[in-house]
Amino acid sequence: MIPKGELTGAVLAGGESRRMGRDKAALVVGDQPLWKRQVLMLRSAGARTVGVVRRPDQPALNLPADIPLWQDEVSGIGPLAGMHAALTACSTGWLAVIATDMPRIEAGWFKWLGGFCSPGCGAMIRRHDGTHEPLAAIYPQAARAEAVRRLAGPNYSLQTLADALIAQKLLVSVPLPGADLWQLENWNTPAEVASRQAAIRR
């Protein structure tokens, strides 16, 4: 369980959005861009501060003053750079991370995961195929040391980062309930947005 005030949130919005053809973070669904929806969701989940993580070369999102912008320090290594930036900025015991293109995740997801957390240990779901979902998880602040070690390469995979953190007992692996699989959809193309946006629960 995460004590009140000890959760920070991070929206990872640094992807190149090649298949979407435009910046996913700025994509408006309903009446708000995806980055804003994810920020509000993490706040509802109990995050005291929620930041948006971007590459330095990306266009500005015109974030309000109460939403910090955290930027990658290393280029060309994918989402590991965003994870490192978020863990570096995190000043609380735990960090809830959500990808900007997973708009079906609800606040209850992180409240549920938080119930598996303990001092110095976060939680991440394990899919039925044995892989984990590192982009909708809660990390302990202590995970930063492993992220720093991996910046030098050669393996930048978040799956192997998750495996290492689980082996170090910094994360617990939680089986995914079959009824919750729908929340893990991510949107990569305009066609996916058109067919799925009506299903978002607001």
Image (tube, helix red, strand yellow):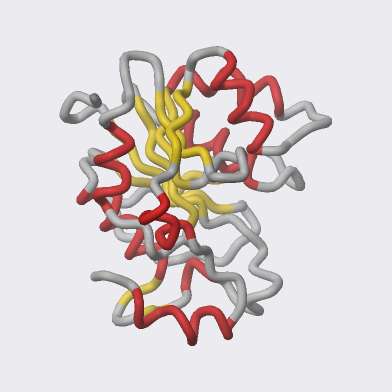
Q: Residue at x 69, y 47 (%)?
A: 78
Q: Is residue 116 above or below residue 168?
A: below
Q: Residue at x 47, y 76 (%)?
A: 27
Total residue callouts: 0
Q: Residue furthest right?
A: 154
Q: Is residue 50 left or right of residue 175?
A: left
Q: Is residue 186 above or below residue 9?
A: below
The location of residue 36, given as percent across then percent down, is: 34, 64
Q: Is residue 77 left or right of residue 166?
A: right
The quadrant of the image that shows the C terminus is: bottom left
The location of residue 49, given as percent across then percent down, is: 28, 41
Q: Residue furthest left?
A: 4
The location of residue 188, given as percent across then percent down, is: 60, 71
Q: Residue at x 37, y 57 (%)?
A: 105
Q: Is residue 9 above or below residue 171?
A: below
Q: Residue at x 43, y 43 (%)?
A: 176
The location of residue 48, given as percent across then percent down, is: 23, 38
The quadrant of the image that shows the N terminus is: top left
Q: Is residue 178 left or right of residue 129?
A: left
